[in-house]
Amino acid sequence: MASQQNYIQWNDSLTIDEGVIDDDHRYLIDLSNQFIRFGNKFENAAQAKELTNLLKDYALAHFRREEDLQAQIGFPDHEEHKKAHAELEENLSKIKGIIDENAGVDLQDVSQQVSLLLRRWLLTHILKHDIEMRQYAPQIRAVSAGTVPLKEVAFL
Ligand SMILES: [Fe+2]
């Protein structure tokens, strides 16, 4: 069982737009926590793969959404931000690789590595890069009005 401190917790310092971006981030944190909770007791590699794929699909959809919103509001660091997302996508591939390579072996150890990656990945990116969008929150909310939250989008 993952201990409480392994979970990634939302806190107000992560707030960006009080809108769709925050909703997406909360959902990605939820999915990561599902992974962390599940991590120590995955029954088999297929289960771990399924959750990793879900996380990947939602993360990529979120990155594209953020990039679109940035383009729409003329966010100055748009191109730099895209590069940061590309790096995160590489990290996600690494996570997928870890899961794929470890099919059939002890997933407990693997889940520890993945938890660390997810934590660094989400929190560092939000606090270092996404935070720059905070000053554009009103514009972001204006252009994203009516956008469907990520958690209501189904990939399956
Ligand atoms: Fe971002």
Image: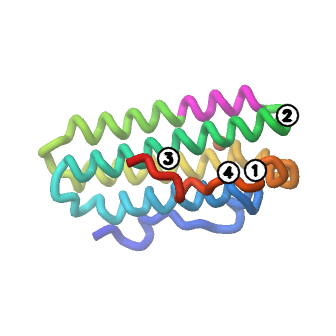
The location of residue 45, given as percent across then percent down, is 19, 47
**Closer to the observer: label 2 or label 4?**
2
Q: Amino acid at mark 2?
A: Gly
Q: Is residue 3 above or below residue 82?
A: below
Observer-nearest of 152 and 53: 152
Question: Closer to the N terminus: mark 1 or mark 4?
Answer: 4
**Closer to the observer: label 4 or label 3?**
3
The location of residue 43, given as percent across then percent down, is 16, 58
Q: Is residue 152 above or below residue 62?
A: below
Question: Closer to the N terminus: mark 2 or mark 4?
Answer: 2
Question: Which residue position holds label 3?
Answer: 58
User: Few, some or many C-alpha atoms within 10 Å of disc 2 (few <14, some 14-19, many ≥20)?
Assistant: few
Secondary structure of residue under mark 1:
helix
* Ligand 1 neighbours mark 2 (CB distance < 8 Å): no
Pointers 2 and 3 in contact (CB under 8 A)? no
Question: Which residue position holds label 4?
Answer: 127
Where on the picture, by quarter, is residue 23? bottom right
Secondary structure of residue under mark 4:
helix
User: Few, some or many C-alpha atoms within 10 Å of disc 3 (few <14, some 14-19, many ≥20)?
Assistant: some
Question: Closer to the N terminus: mark 2 or mark 3?
Answer: 3
* Real-space CA distance between mark 1 and mark 2, rounded to the nearest whole angstrom: 14 Å
Question: Closer to the N terminus: mark 3 or mark 1?
Answer: 3
Question: Which residue position holds label 2?
Answer: 74
**Closer to the observer: label 3 or label 1?**
1
Pointers 4 and 3 in contact (CB under 8 A)? no
**Closer to the observer: label 1 or label 2?**
1
